[in-house]
Amino acid sequence: MSKTDVSRFYELLSVDRELAAEAMTFQQKYSSQEEVIGAFIELAARQGLYFTDAELVEYIFENGQEVRE
C-alpha cells in the first residue's frame, strides 16, 4: 500500500476510458463520500494497486491540481 500506487492508479485512469467511466459513476451510485472512496479503493485493488483511504487523501492533498486535470 502506498501513495505510489495511488499515482499509478490515476495514471491508469487517464489512459483507460472504461475504467475512468466506472470510477465516475461512484458519485451517483453511493450516498456517502466514505462509500465513494471505498469503491474507488476497491476498483484500484482489482487493478493490483493497493492503498488506504489516508494515502488517497494525502495524495490528493499533495497533488490536487494534478488530480483534477
Image (spheres, rainbow, N blue to C red):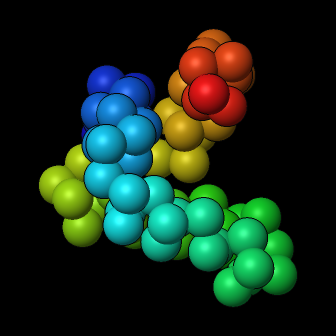
Residue 28 shows in the view: yes
Quadrant location of residue 35? Answer: bottom right
Q: Residue furthest right?
A: 31
Seen at 62% across and 27% down, the residue is: 69
29 or 1, nearer to the observer: 29
Quadrant location of residue 15? Answer: top left
Picture coordinates of residue 62 (x, y %)?
63, 14
Seen at 62% across and 74% down, the residue is: 25
Picture coordinates of residue 28 (x, y %)?
75, 79
Seen at 63% across and 73% down, the residue is: 26
Picture coordinates of residue 59 (x, y %)?
55, 25
Residue 7 versus residue 66 in the image, above or below = below
Quick check: 53 left or right of 68? left
Q: Quadrant of the N terminus?
A: top left
Quadrant location of residue 14? Answer: top left
Quick check: 33 left or right of 52? right
Residue 37 versus residue 30 in the image, above or below = above
In this rendering, the count of numbered labels is 0
67 or 54, nearer to the observer: 67
Quick check: 59 left or right of 30? left
Seen at 67% across and 31% down, the residue is: 68
